[in-house]
């Protein structure tokens, strides 16, 4: 165990109001690729750049092609929670972790047992008709070859935040409140390069900011505990 990991474990043990803020790196050990690593989505070759294909305008103009990419590269229905998801759920069960704030849309935190999960970018498990508002499960999207449609004829859209779309203001405000009240903030598996989500850590006022990521981030110098390693490896000591 490195000195940084020991300080992380000690801080978790001593804290009573922990908030976890995570990104794509939380789910890579469940077999879901992230975006910016060597094997990430942004380094793969498609007809259009991946960030274009998950934009609001692309969804509107090329809906069928959006769904082809979405089903192929954004949804992993067979993925299961990994060690990090499970350890976070255990910390919540113990009363130490007050919330998980996630940029992920996979629902794995809830599958692991976490109850207080704020999904900044929505969830693949919620889908709604753009005409009548009726909600549909993930199966309605995955079991359709082309554009999924409601019984009313409207297009079914995943309840996920695409590029060019704004975040849910209520979720954003609740995230700010929870982070500002936390005695420990654990930031894991995120490059902290996507805003406004990345800017949330600015609201932390404590002295136990733990930043766990395999690669460097713009906030490394501000971390009280900096661990450049995998989340599963680090959380295995909890």
Image (cartoon, helix red, strand yellow):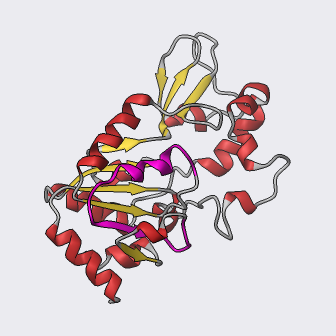
Write the start and end of the magenta stretch as one range: 194-217
Q: Where is residue 84 in the image (x, y as percent from the top left)?
A: 36, 66
181 relative to 80, above or below: above
The answer, for residue 195, to whether it is visible in the render is: yes
Q: Where is residue 102 in the image (x, y as percent from the top left)?
A: 42, 49
Which residue is at the front of the view, 89 or 220?
220
The answer, for residue 105, to whether it is visible in the render is: no
State left or right for residue 213 relative to residue 40: left
Which residue is at the front of the view, 198 or 165?
198
Q: Position of residue 20 (x, y in %)?
A: 33, 57
Residue 204 in the magenta stretch? The answer is: yes
Task: Determine the residue located farthest toward the right in the rendered image.
Answer: 47
Residue 108 in the magenta stretch? The answer is: no
At x 34%, y 42%, the residue is: 176
State left or right for residue 65 relative to residue 128: right
State left or right for residue 33 relative to residue 185: right
At x 68%, y 68%, the residue is: 39
**Number of marks in the rendered image:** 0
Q: For residue 172, what is the image quadrant? A: top left
Q: Quadrant of the C terminus?
A: bottom left
Q: Quadrant of the N terminus?
A: bottom left
Q: Position of residue 210 (x, y in %)?
A: 35, 68
State left or right for residue 24 relative to residue 47: left
């Amino acid at each position: 165990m490195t000195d940084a990991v020991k300080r992380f474990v000690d801080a978790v043990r001593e804290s009573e109001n922990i908030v976890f803020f995570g990104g794509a790196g939380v789910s890579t050990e469940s077999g879901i690729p992230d975006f910016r690593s060597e094997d990430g989505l942004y380094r793969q070759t498609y007809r259009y750049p991946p960030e274009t294909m998950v934009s609001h305008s692309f969804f509107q103009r090329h809906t069928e092609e959006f769904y082809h990419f979405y089903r192929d590269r954004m949804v992993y229905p067979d993925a299961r929670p990994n060690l990090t998801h499970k350890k976070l759920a255990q910390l919540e069960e113990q009363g130490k972790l007050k919330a998980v704030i996630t940029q992920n849309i996979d629902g794995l935190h809830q599958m692991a047992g976490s109850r207080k999960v704020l999904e900044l970018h929505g969830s693949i498990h919620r889908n709604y008709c753009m005409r009548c508002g009726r909600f549909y499960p993930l199966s309605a999207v995955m079991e359709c070859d082309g554009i999924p449609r409601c019984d009313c004829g409207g297009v079914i859209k995943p309840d996920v935040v695409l590029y060019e779309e704004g975040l849910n203001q209520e979720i954003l405000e609740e995230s700010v409140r929870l982070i500002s009240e936390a005695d420990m903030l654990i930031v894991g598996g995120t490059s902290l390069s996507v805003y406004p989500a990345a800017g949330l850590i600015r609201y932390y006022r404590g002295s136990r900011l733990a930043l766990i990521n395999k690669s460097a981030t713009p906030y490394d110098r501000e971390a009280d505990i900096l661990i450049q390693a995998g989340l599963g490896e680090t959380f295995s000591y909890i």
